[in-house]
């Protein structure tokens, strides 16, 4: 299979569509927010016109109030890969959620350990009293590897890692290492998109934010705000929460838009940090993506193999 990764606004969707058209593929979204129905502008989903060009999977599969985990993603993505390959077509993953991509590529399996509501509630109370930074420091003391991989603002994952440790005595990083198979399950070409300099990336992000605002982001974010107590994942997502002060009368729209641009830039930097740690990524200039001969040869061979098997 092929994987297209990179920071937000790097052109992953466009490249994935071109690959799918050239090598008879189907696209699997690896984005933690594009799974949700009705959240289209803020998540930068492929447009209906783009989705009409090639089949897309794992888009619009959950309602915004539903939870969705990396374990859910790897199970559904693996099923989609089998079905696409079974049709003799090339599976192409495209997205920017690093945890989803790394977990699937590495073939990680996840514990069926059910959540402990009592422990989770207690940790949530402590987080409300002490703050997210204190909970992240607590995680760093028992599981420094996971703490390094989880942003301090991602309180949900911080608490989940602490819950796992308190309930089982196992660290999340240790569990991930133990669940990694000796050999990855897929023969994978990983294509990375990045710009030659950060300023070009930032200009691309600013342009995307402008287009989102013109395309109805404010109305979409207002729906998220109105449902913020039940749409909890969306209410914490970049692209929506930055506009909440506008709805509350605490900031002008222009000020909130500037916050969104900066938050998106920060997110892109975190994405690149994650992707740069991944091995065997074939990096290309996002402004002029051009497949090297080795990548083209891989895709040609993969396509021939799928066709012969089918």
Image: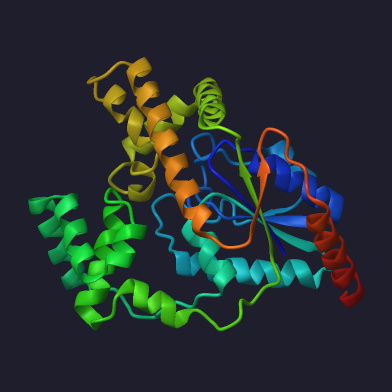
Q: Where is residue 292 in the image (x, y as percent from the top left)?
A: 79, 50
- Can residue 239 be seen here? The reply is no
Q: Tell me the colour scheme of the image.
A: rainbow
Quadrant housing residue 174: bottom left
Please tell me in which quadrant of the rendered image residue 185 appears: bottom right
Residue that appears at 42% across and 75% down: 176
Who's the residue at 86% across and 66% down the image? 301
Position of 217 compared to 282: left or right? left
Residue under the point 69% across and 66% down? 188
Give above or below for 219 relative to 227: above
Query: Looking at the rendering, in which quadrant would you find the C terminus?
Result: bottom right
Residue 42 location (% of width, % of height) = 49, 36
Q: In this view, does 70 lie above or below 134?
A: below
x%, y% of residue 281? 63, 57
Quadrant of image for the N terminus: bottom right
Taking 116 as reference, is 258 above or below it? above
The answer to whether one can see residue 131 in this image is yes
Query: Residue 277 appears at what percent x and percent y?
Result: 49, 58
Q: Nearer the viewer, residue 109 or 176?
A: 176
Q: Using the image as rendered, state which of residue 7 and residue 34 is in the foreground.
A: 7
Q: Which of 216 and 212 is in front in this view?
A: 212
């Amino acid at each position: 299979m092929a994987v297209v990764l990179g920071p937000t606004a790097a052109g992953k969707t466009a490249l994935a569509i071109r690959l799918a058209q050239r090598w008879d593929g189907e696209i699997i979204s690896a984005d933690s927010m594009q799974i949700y129905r009705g959240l289209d502008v803020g998540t930068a989903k492929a447009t209906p016109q783009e989705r009409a060009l090639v089949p897309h999977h794992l888009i619009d599969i959950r309602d915004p109030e539903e939870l969705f985990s990396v374990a859910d993603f790897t199970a559904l993505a693996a099923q989609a890969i089998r079905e696409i390959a079974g049709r003799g077509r090339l599976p192409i993953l495209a997205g920017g959620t690093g945890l989803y991509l790394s977990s699937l590529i590495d073939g990680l399996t996840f514990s069926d350990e059910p959540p402990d509501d009592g422990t989770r509630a207690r940790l949530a109370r402590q987080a409300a009293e002490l703050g997210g930074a204190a909970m992240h420091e607590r995680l760093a003391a028992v599981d420094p590897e996971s703490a390094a991989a989880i942003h301090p603002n991602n309180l949900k994952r911080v608490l989940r890692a602490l819950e796992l440790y308190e309930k089982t005595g196992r660290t999340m990083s240790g569990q991930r290492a133990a669940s990694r198979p000796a050999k990855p399950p897929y023969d994978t070409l990983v294509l990375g998109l990045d710009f030659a300099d950060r300023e070009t990336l930032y200009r691309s992000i600013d342009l995307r934010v402008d287009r989102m605002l013109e395309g109805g982001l404010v109305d979409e974010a207002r729906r998220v705000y109105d449902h913020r107590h039940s749409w909890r994942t969306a209410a914490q997502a970049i692209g929506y929460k930055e506009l909440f002060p506008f709805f509350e009368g605490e900031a002008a729209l222009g000020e909130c838009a500037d916050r969104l641009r900066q938050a998106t830039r920060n997110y892109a930097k975190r994405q690149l940090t994650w992707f740069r740690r991944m091995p065997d990524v074939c990096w290309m200039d996002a402004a002029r993506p051009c497949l090297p001969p080795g990548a083209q040869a891989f895709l040609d061979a993969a396509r021939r193999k799928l066709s012969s098997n089918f």
